[in-house]
Image: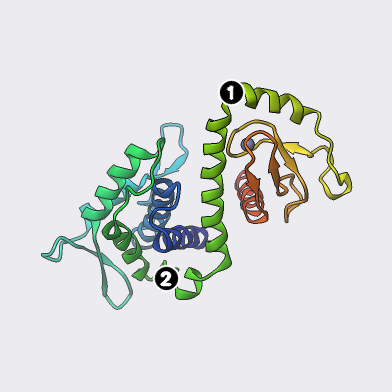
Amino acid sequence: MQHERAEQYGRCAVVLDVDLDVPGAAAIFDQALTNGLTAIVAHVWPGDESQRLKNGHDRMKSASHLLDVITERCIEDGQGQLLIPNNQDKTHLSADVANLRDALDQTQRVRHGRDTGTLTKQQVTALLGLDEHVCLRQVSDERRESDWVKNEIRDRYEQRRAADYLELIGQEEVDRRIVLASDHVAAHPDDLVEGKDVVTCPVCNRETLAVTGIDDFGVGYGPGTCLACSYVFSSHAAHEEALSHMLSRHSKD
Ligand SMILES: [Zn+2]
């Protein structure tokens, strides 16, 4: 699980490093920071990354609680950086906790609105700085240039475009399209998981996404196009949805 967290941190941090203004930047920042801090705290102070609930279950701490753990347990270097133990040989990672907290305050405010351009370069630099920790080490030139990062950024802009389009056409037109979508017949039904020719669209949340293929796991998140908002659900986006579906199902086993 720690490796998946580290990887999530790395992917999200690199997306922001490549494009600071990507649509959804605030949510991506939170995801990167929460996963990165959880991996670090679990590595340095095992058990402190989660809290026990009244019902006896453990829950992962939020990014802001994880920063509290680090603030309590680490000393300052005299220049506003906190020194997090990094390795067996007693080296430390200097973490810019003040900038990370500022960024969190900001991202919490805009999570549900439009959030382009709210993060600063310093905040993303503070996020990338965590990568020096021995349990992360996920940000590399190779990753910056990866197809995954390019496809992820492209999909974020596509989601934004479709959301704008949805606003433009208005509710009445959307309702008309939902009715039409319910009569949709797949052009190549043999290429689909049975009964999955129209599924819920991640942008407009209606059951209007006409599926044109099968995802890598065959769980019904095939790529396609939404008949209401026009969102093009790429093979990359379909793979990611299917993967998170598989992971959440797996964690319940
Ligand atoms: Zn849609």
- Residue 253 visible at all: no
- Residue 178 visible at all: yes
Residue closest to the far bottom: 89
> Which residue type does callout 2 highlight?
Arg
- In this figure, which residue is indicated by the disc labeled 2? 137
x then y, percent, for residue 89: 29, 78
**Mark 1, residues whose alpha carbon is within 10 Å: few (<14), some, or many (≥20)?**
few
Q: How is the image coloured?
A: rainbow
x then y, percent, for residue 214: 77, 51
- Label of residue 39 in the image: none
Please tell me in which quadrant of the rendered image residue 88 appears: bottom left
- In this figure, which residue is indicated by the disc labeled 1? 171
Q: Residue at x 19, y 62 (%)?
A: 81
* Observer-nearest of 193 and 184: 184
Q: Residue at x 51, y 71 (%)?
A: 145
Q: Residue at x 45, y 42 (%)?
A: 58
